[in-house]
Every structure is written in C-alpha cells, then in structure tokens.
Image: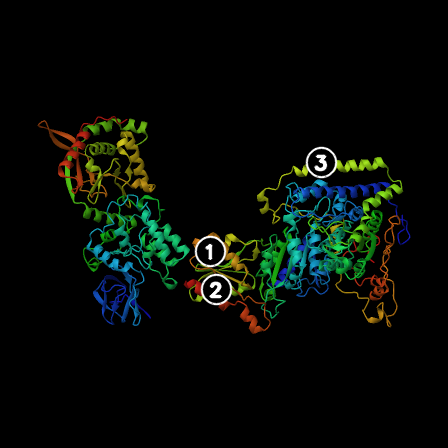
Amino acid sequence: MAPVTMLEAIRQAMFEEMDRDPAVVAIGEDIGVYGGAFKVTEGLLERFGNERVIETPISETAIVGAACGMSYLGLRPIVEMQFIDFIACCFNQVTNFVAKGHYLWGAPAPMVIRGPSGGGVHGGPFHSANPEMYFAHTPGLKIVYPSTPYDAKGLLKSAVRDNNPVLFFEHKFLYRRVKEELPTDEYTVPLGKAVTRREGRDLTILSYAAMMQTSLDAAAELEKEGIEAEVIDLRTLMPLDKEAILASVKKTNKLLIVHEDTRTGGIAGEIASLVCENAFEDLDGPIARVTSLDTPVPYAPTLEEYFLPNAAKVAAAARELARY
Amino acid sequence: MAVDVVMPQMGESIFEGTITKWLKKAGDKIERDEPLFEISTDKVDAEIPSPSAGVLKEIKIAEGQTVPVQTVVAVIEADGAGARSAAPSAQAPASAVAKAEALEGGPAPAGVEAPPPDDEKAAPGPVPTKSDPQGQRGAQKTAAAAPAPPRAPDAKTASSAPPAKSAAADAGSREKVRSSPLVRRLAKEHEVDLTQVPGTGAGGRVSKKDILGAIEGGGARTEAPSTAAPAAPWTAQPSVGTPAARATIESAVPREKIYFGKYDVQPMSVMRQKIAEHMVLSKRVSPHVYSVDEVDMTPIASLRAKSKAKFEESAGTKLTFMPFFVRAAVEGLRAFPTVNASVDGTNVVLHKECNIGIAVALDWGLIVPVIKNAEEKNFLGIARSMNDLAERARSKKLKPEEVAESTFSITNPGVFGGLFGLPVINQPNVAILGLGAIEKRPVVIDDAIAIRSMVYLTLSYDHRVVDGAIAHQFMAKIKHTLENWTESIL
Amino acid sequence: MSPSSNGAAVAPVTRQQCLDLYYYMRLNRAVEDQMMKLFRQNKIVGGLYSSLGQEAISVGTAYALEKRDWMAPMIRNIGALLVKGVKPRDIFTQHMAKFTSPTQGKDGTSHFGDLKNLHIVSPISMLGDLIPVMTGVAMAGRYLGQDIVTMTWIGDGGSSTGAFHEGLNLAATQRAPFVLVLENNQWAYSTPVSRQVPVRDLAERGRAYGITSVTVDGNDAIAVFEASRAAVAQCRAGNGPVLIEAKTMRMKGHAQHDPAEYVPKAMREYWEARDPIVLFEKYLNANKLWDARAKQEIEARIAALVKEDLEFAENSPMPPAELAEQGVYCEGCHTIEAEWHRPKAEVTPPKSSVAAGWNVKDFGGIENSATGGNGASARPAASPMHLSAGKAVQKSSGGLAQQSSSPKKLAQQSSSPKKIAAVPERRPFGRGPKGKKGGGR
C-alpha cells in the first residue's frame, strides 16, 4: 500500500467509522459537496448521503450544540471546525454544555470536534491557533493532537468510539507533509498513551504535533555531538500519560518540553509541575521548555519564524540542559 | 581569569600521577614557575611549577590521590584577583593540618576510637572518593590518601564520626554543595559525602555522572544486594571516612617495584579491601601477644562420637567441636571479664554480654558472624546458632546486625591443617582464640604414654589491657572446662 | 374549539385534559410555594426562582408532548417537568442539593435531566444554548426514525443571545421538528423587555427565520395548550420548527433575593388580575367542567404528594464529599446505543449514496425579491404555515386581543414568507424516514 498523508489518514478514519456504525455522522461547514475546506471530508457525501453529512450555516455554537443534542440520542457526531480557531466562537457550548454534562447530570456526549490547527503556514493570527490549553483546563474533555498519519487515523477512530467528548486537533502543517504506509487491517490507537519516538539516555524531549518532527530533527543534530536525546510524543494531551513521562524522567533525569503553543499557560508548565511533584529527586537539572512567544501569531514569515520554535532552538536548549 | 592546573604527563607511557604534596594552600599567592605541588608517578617523582602567577583559588585533588594525566588538580586566579579564601571555604586551612596528621599514620582523633559497631550497616557505600575522584575508574586504585580535609574539623569536634551521626552533617553538606535533587538523593542513599565528590557539571556542580562515578568507584559492589554479608564483615571496621582508615592501605615499597616481569592485576573486592584495611589497623592499634596451650579433647571426642547421631536427630543440626569451644570460651570470659572488653582511649569498656564472633572462611573471603548473648544460650542453642550463621554466611544471607557487635572472637585455622595459628585480633575485641587441628598425639599421663586427641589453642591478646597472667589464667579456665566437660549436650 | 387554519377540525380539549391542566398548574404552584418556605428556612442551597404567574405556559406547552418526545426546561419551567413525569421530590432534592437528587447534588435547581426514560435534557445557566441542542435532538430523532418532537423554552431576555439566533437559524434551515416556546414575561432580571428587544412581538424573531411563529396569551392555559398542540402536530408532520410567543408576566423577582421593586405598581396590578390559575378556575366553573368536590380532591392529592415528597427530601442526606472527584469522564459507566426505528440499511451504502452537487433554483437576483422593482407594496407578514399568527384564542380571559404583528413598517421589511418557503434548493438533512407522508416542503 502506498504511503498516505495525515490528511488522507484522517479521511480514511472517518470513512471507516461511518461505514462501521451508522450512528456516526459528520456535521460542519462546507463538508459535503465541497468536501471540506481542506478536503478532509471529500467523498463522504457521495457515500453516506445528506442525512449523515450535514452542511450547516456559519454557526459554531449551533453546530456544536446540535451535535451535543444528537449525541444524547446515541449518535456519534464528528464536528468539523473549518479552522480550529473558530472553536472560540462556541467556547461556551464546548466548556459549559458538552464538557460538563456527564459530571453534572450523567449525560455523556460521545462526539468529536476536529479541525485544522497550528501555524507555520503563514496563516496569520486567526488561522494558526493551538487552543488546546483552554480545553485542557476544562474537566470533562479529552484532547488529542497526533503527529503521524498512523496515529491520526488510529486516534480518530478511538475518539469516535469514546463515550467522552474529544477535541481532535490536526496540525495543518503536517496535513500533507508527513506520509507513511498504513496497515490494511483495522487498527486503533488508544487515547491517553504517549509513545517513545527515539530512545536516549542524556535527556528527554517531550513534544507533540508538528513540534514532534522538530524535536526529532534536533535530536539527530544532538546525536552528532554525542548527546543522546530520548524523544517522546505525547499524542494525547488530556488525559496525559503521566506514567510515560515520569518513567522517562527517571531514566534520563533531564526534561525538555517543546510545544508550538504559546509559553504562558502551555502544557509545559503543567508537566513541569507534575514532574516536580512526582519525580523531583530524579531530576539532575532544571526542567526546560521551548515554546512559541507569548504573542498572537504574526503574519509576516520573518515574524512567524521568530515566533515559532524550530530545531535549532530545541537543540540549543537541549545542549544547555545536557551540559548542566 | 581562572587558570587550570593539570596533572602533567611525565613520560610517554605514564597515564596517571599521584599528588604527594601541596606546597601551597588555597588563598596563597603564587608566582609564575614557583613550585606548586609534588607528584609521584610510575617512573619518576617531580616537583611541578605553577603555570601562572596569581592566587591559588582552589585545590581540586587532595594529597595522596591519584588521577589521570590532564586532570585539573587546581585552579589559579591569575593576576589581578585578590587573595580570596578558597572555594572549599574556611575548611581549607584545617585540611592541611589534618592531612599532615593522617600521613603520619597516627590515628586521627576521630577514627578508631570506639566507632559504634554498626557503622556501616553493611552498606557497601560509604567510600567517598577514596580511590576515584574522577568517578571513572574501578576499585583498582589503592588510593592511599587522606581524603577528607573538610571532615577533619568535624572529626576534631565530634567524638567520633559514625555515619549515623554524620548524616545530619551530611545533609548539611549535601545542601551546601551544588548538585541537583537526583544527586542529593543518590548521595543520601549511598551515604556518600558530597563534599568529597568533585563536580564536573555546570559551574562545578556535582552531576549525575559524578555521583554515579563516586558510588561505583568507591564502593563497587560485586553483585549482591547491599544487605548481604560479604559487604561488611568487620564489625569493628572504623568509619571509612576517617583519615586513619584511609592510611591503612598504603604501600611499603614504591609502586613501580611491584610491577616487574609478567603479572596479572586483580582489583580487590570490597570485602578484600576491608579485610586488608582492618588487618593493618588491628596490628597497628593493638600490641599483639600470643599465648599457646594444648587441650586434651579425648573425652569430648568420645562424647561427640557417641552422641553425634542422636544429637543430630533430636536437635536437627550437626554436632561439631565448635560449640564445645564456644561454651568453654564463655566460661572463660565470665571468669575473666577483662578479656571480654574493648578499649576507648583510656577507658576499658567491659561488655556485659558475650557476643562470640566465629570466623567463617568463604570461597571469596572471610566473614565473622556473631552469636549474640552466648552467655544465655545452652549447648544446643549455641550449636544451632552457629550452624545457622555459618550456613547463611556461605549463602550470603546474613543480616548486617549479625556481623556486628562481637565482644570476643574464635577462629579455626586448624581446619586447614597446621598445628596452631597466631590470629589477628578482631577489633574492637581485645582477644581472639585460635583453634588448631584436633589430632591424636602421644602424651604422657601418669608417667605412661597415651594416645589422646589433642588440640593446640592460641590466644592472641591485646597487651594494652590483657596481661599475660590474665591471659594464661583465661586459657587455663578454657582448658579445664574442655577437659572436664560436664554440661549435657542434648 | 377553534378550527385549525387549514379548516380541518381540531379535537376540542377534553374535560380530563382540562382537569389535568389544572392539576399540574396547581401542583406547580404548590411545589414552588413549598420551596419558598424552605428557602426562608435556609434549606435551599443557592438561589430560588419562581414561575409565579407563568404556570399556564409551562404546563400548557408540555402537556402537548407525547411520552416519546423530548424537552429541555429552563429554571422557570418546573410545571413542564411535572407534566413530563418528574416527581416533586426530585425538584426538592435538587434545590436542597441532596444526595438523592437526580444529579446527586452535583448541580441544583432544574439542572438535571433524564436521557433514557423521561427524555429531558438539562439546561445550563447560559441562555439560548438549549435551542441548538434541542435542534440536534430533533435532527437525531428524525434520523433514527423515532418520530419525535422536541421542545424548549426561552425568555424574552434570552432571545437576544447569539445561541438563540444561531440555534433558530439552524433549526429553520434543517426544518427540525422543534418547538420553541418564548415566554415573554416582560422582564429580563431588572430590565424591561422594551429595553431588550426592538420589537413588541417576539414572534417576529421567528419570522425572521422563516418559521411558523405565533403569539398567544400565556396566561390562558387552553390557548397555550391548543397552540402547542398545533405546533407539535406541524412538527410531526415534518413542516419545520415553530416558535410560540407566550405573553405573560413574571410575578416575582428574578430570584428570591430580588424584590423586583423596579416593576411599576400599575403593571403588577394589571397582571395580578390575570393570574392563570384563577382564570382557569373561572373557566372550569363557567363551563361546568368540575365541582367543588373535584377541586377539593385535586387539592388533597396535591397536598398529600407535596407533603410526602417534602418529607423524603428533608430526610435525605447530603452527598458524600468524595463524590466531588467522580464522574468527570465516562469510562464505561454508560453504554451508548442509539434506538433505531428505521432500517440502518437506509443510511448505509449503497442506499445512502447520492450524487454530490447543488440544485440551485433561485439564482437570488433582485427581480425575484418581495419588495420588487418599486418596492412599495406592503405585504402582511403572515405566517406561511398552518397556524395563523396571533389569533385571539380565549375570549373569556378578556385579555388583550392578540393580533398579528401588523404595523405596516414591519411588513415592508420582510420578504414574503411564502417565497422563502418555496421549494428548497436542496433537500436538507433528513426528510425523515422514507415513505412518511408530508415530508419536506
């Protein structure tokens, strides 16, 4: 089988889930005839029809609210945010209705909200968001942010089958840039489990999404200098795979966290606290992080490059940590 | 600006050198080319001139330590920097004094004075930088060094410096030395004094690599877990942190005189190192005098032959000669308490319990498990304890407290042949009984020659507290007990 | 009683139905009276909201639903909960945060639901969000072939939220079988409706979305019921959502803490004369639908029920502290299964397959719009659907005659509803199960 892009892998997941279970429906703007702004849903309408591929007005609150209502009857809607940035428009629905229902009155909302996320594509401040932390901060939601086609497909399938609302972030930079061969057999990837992309012993680099590739590139650089970095892909941000994180820290004793999200309030702070609480005496150096700046995503390429992390910045931070 | 002073390479095949003397101390001014320190290597001894003018900021490698060439042994703050007190702060001046003392070989005031017996808790650990400041090499190096300059003030003020008490001091030093949470935890777990570990991490902090090296290099375990007996056989082993202990592993001849012709080098195991240290120390500390006597074991031999099977069946353990000797020794110790004592400076510590250490030969060394409160045990109790301890000694299942706190020891060199032996006292005891082989010999009884099972017994005793009269009377008591055995053994 | 707009006879409201309506209104008020006492005894946790004067709306609308239909009440719709089958004890325990409440004390007031049996969706405190949610429920029900109608309520204040508009727009474009009851009780907290909305009749807001919108006298239980019944029937027939504006007055403050002194005395007196329960009693008397004994029997039944459920609530424990940690995620505690009332094959390939493409009939140019070339003609903004807007329903109430929103200026602004309701460009999501009559217009 030929290698497929992450985008294609996501589409495959949706097709397969909708084939498997007629309770799975898709809802969003322009997802039918047009096939979605990024063509992720291309072909779904032809196969599954109008009742299951629902095209909506530009009304994120209504879209998410309707999906929530559908999920109460046992449907499993996959909501597309045309750009994940627009999830801000339905923040109330997501955090106050969808997230809280199970805890408050026993109403699970088995729905997925997915959308193209992240920057590095000259998208500017409203088409480059990494909004994961608003929702990581909201109990009741699960958050997934894969970095490979294999994971994207497997995780989306798991997300659809999960009884909880799952936010599924798809890094648009990776959409067509990463390719890999996928198994022909049915498979899923479990939520809540990180994976080690590269074994190492001098320090651990923890990352996810587009920064995963950046971290691996940095690790390759570092290897030439005799620094062996262990690189771990979180894949799921909520719930965090605490065991994997702590096990790696216990092994290498140094931790560097890399994320494209802005610095303040990014998940690196949360993970650093977690490690201090649980593995303080396994640390042989301060916990470091490489993140984007605390600014909106700027538009000009020179500005955006300065804003974003890159392999050189990651390698520099890793070098310093290794030297400590 | 800081200038590194390194161990020079004195010849093509030379790869390490030992610092024998620092001619300057931290804080001293130094001129370019002025003699700074002396080294000893396999080929040559030399005086090393300073590479720079300025102030000697920090001495990194202490006298007596051996390091690879190119190792930074000191740092000079070149010209312009004022004479600061050196990095290891105010402890530096005292260290010079302590070093001098240690080199002279006299026991530092701390050290040997009745260190509490369970110092080590069988931990293989407490060997800071004894042999390997760089954390690179194994136990191969017999670092004949007084390693603990900052310790000396502690040692002077505290009466003794057992690791238990110095844990608090250690905690303090762990905090003062720049390291990391991981390093501090490891130091605590392995009882490593962080002030002893040179730091190669950022800003000179002690890094994971450094502490692991210190642990590995200093107390390299073979494979057994730390509670296993082989690690710490000698109850009386003084805290290995004390200067005196360090000084016991020294060479009588220059090292190059040892290496000639063909040879294999076998690094000492931890147990072997400890035995070596202990033996030297014991001989140095206690003036050994020997008393030899012979005992007619015929009645006991026949008693044993008769009762062996029955005993083993009812008691569930073997019947050897050893319990007889132990019981007899206990009687002797009861009668002559001075022999059941220890020495603390000018005090004689008379132990009220009779804890008899029994030397057990192992394939890999020697260990002395202790029968506690032997004075309360009957023959059967003694036999059982002994066999159990011996068996667990061989299977490495002894607990730390079982090799500690002896008050008197017995060894049995006769088992390997020979008439009798002259054993070394097991510190902090003041005497040790050596058993020869039990053999049939012709003796004169009532002017006739009889064939009797005879054994030579030797008492090595510490003449600081045990005089010949006592020693001989003690031996006579033992002989009498053995030759007139009355106690029921079943 | 009144013919439907298409002329077909509509069943009159039966005597039993009248008695039921009365019972539930009375029960509604009794439950709230009791809670007011509990509040003053410090037994209610948090705030207490009253629907005094609005009971006819809660009861009359909910009574039009079938058991299989879904509802999502708001805080002033306790009457609707009671009609749907919720016991007073559930309402008491919710307000008292007891462990025996439907949410085990996790949330209060009417923030609870029941997906499986009573088909009630819990509200959240933010207003308007129930509209898209119940739209989604309606869409899903249709998709699954369940033949359900969904209903929720909103106030005049809540009708200004984005969620209201997004939700109604979505419901309209999806032609969801959804009834929205807009209770215009004249006040949003302390702000009169004239300050909140630029139109007098909030039914206009529905018309803006091209859906059937009616205005009724909210204090006339029969009128409310009949309007609701018609709305539900229309939805079930697949003709799209309906907005019912019920005009009423909030007789108490926003909540217990609010004495509502901002309400002008004259206004209060006007509405006090229009108490819905008093009006209904008059109606029952006038039409000889009951007697003193029947009344007394209802009272007794209510009193006994309230007493029993109050005792249960008061004797219930508070939840254990550790419960706070539980339930954030569903990890196997629920088995989620849709209830299919149609063959799944209909929505799976190959039967589900369609050609992807748009069938655009109206190209959208100016010449086709209602205002036309010279734009002078004014058309009445009449409802395009079966129910005529603003019909005066109950004579005996003697209240305001409800007119359609007639000011000429309004009519000019809207394009002809008939035009909007013409053949949709594309069959929207779900005509409902195949073979169902009246599908999709």
Q: Amino acid at mark 3?
A: Glu
Say what secondary structure mark 1 lies in: helix
- Residue that mark 2 sits on: A219
Q: Is residue A1 visible?
A: no
Q: Nearer the viewer, mark 2 or mark 1?
A: 1
- Residue that mark 1 sits on: A249
Looking at this view, is B388 or B240 the one in front?
Answer: B240
Q: Nearer the viewer, mark 2 or mark 3?
A: 3
Residue C242 % position (x, y): 80, 55
Check the residue under mark 2 and report the chain it is in. A
Give the CA distance from mark 1 to mark 3: 60 Å
Say what secondary structure mark 2 lies in: helix
Answer left or right for C382 relative to C74: right
Q: Are marks 2 and 3 in contact (CB under 8 Å)?
A: no
Residue C27 % position (x, y): 77, 41
Residues at marks 2 and 3 on the same chain: no
Compared to residue A203, the image places residue B343 above or below, namely: above
Answer left or right for C194 relative to A141: right
Residue B260 % position (x, y): 21, 59
Compared to residue B74, the image places residue B144 above or below, namely: above
Q: Which mark is residue C308?
A: 3
Check the residue under mark 1 and report the chain it is in. A
Instruction: Determine the image quadrant of residue C81.
Output: top right
Compared to residue B468, the image places residue C411 above or below, namely: below
Q: Which mark is residue C135?
A: none
Residue B476 % position (x, y): 15, 33
Dot 3 surroundings within 10 Å: few (below 14), some, or many (20 or more)? Answer: few
Quadrant of the snapshot with the C terminus of chain C: bottom right
* Snapshot colouring: rainbow
Q: Amino acid at mark 2?
A: Ala
